[in-house]
Image (cartoon, rainbow, N blue to C red):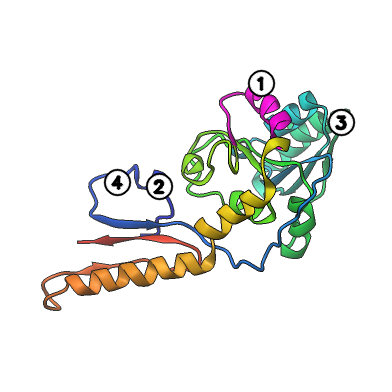
Amino acid sequence: MRIVSQSQRTPAPDMNWLATIHHGLPLTLLPFTERSEEYLAFLGRIDPEKGPDVAIRVSHAAGLPLRIAAKVPRGHTRYFKETIKPLMEGNGAHFVGEVNDREKQSFLGKARALLFPINWPEPFGLVMIEAMACGTPVIAWPRGSVPEVIEDGVTGFIVESEADAVAAIARARSLDRRRIRETFERRFSARRMAEDYVRHYHLLLGRRSTPNQELIRTAPCTSGAAVEIA
């Protein structure tokens, strides 16, 4: 079973978990950007649970343009046409479409902040650490893994309402972008993730006295997981 956050364990609290290993990214994938521009970013997919409508309202209330880099899933084209597009008109929001890793460097790195207004228990939220890699603060709602990833007042702000988010945008300038990048390097690098895997695999192997005494079940992946033993 692939588990990338403590929050994702919630449906199965009685399983014999050994550790949660958060996602990691190569340090060179998204370089640090020291100076931001005057816009906010939303990166994800057009889906009610991702909250693009909330991002548009918050950015408009904050008086900053919003750039939306997102995929429109086939099942949500009607939602995009009937809810999101009309909301964008006159509210300073611009739909960029999908972006690749190279385009993310500029899109995330130059934003004053990333808005992450999720409305579901997000298992991890890779976009949060992508923004942090660029030095960009994240303004997010406390659902799913958000409290595990974001250090409130250091790498961004965890908010409870749209009004809180607007206030957090004003405070985002006070955050040290280089410290955000340093936090990413310490907590969410691919090297840290790999070292965590190796350490816990060794721990599991050290517990095995005979091949039949203990069954080891793991879920290797390239991004992050937890180890469960039975």
Spatial CA span between label 2 and label 3: 37 Å
In the image, residue 116 lies at what x, y percent?
A: 63, 39
Image point 75% across, 59% down: which residue? 105
Label 2 or label 3, whichever comes before in sequence order: 2
In the image, residue 8 lies at what x, y percent?
A: 40, 47
Residue tagged 1: 163
In the image, residue 47 lies at what x, y percent?
A: 64, 41
Image point 70% across, 36% down: which residue? 174
Residue tagged 4: 12
Label 2 close to label 3 by CB (< 8 Å)? no
Q: What is the three-letter code of the residue carrying label 3?
A: Glu
Is residue 163 on the magenta stretch?
A: yes
Q: Which numbered tag is attached to residue 8?
A: 2
Q: Which numbered tag is attached to residue 89?
A: 3
Spatial CA span between label 4 and label 1: 34 Å
Label 1 or label 3, whichever comes before in sequence order: 3
Q: Quadrant of the C terminus?
A: bottom left
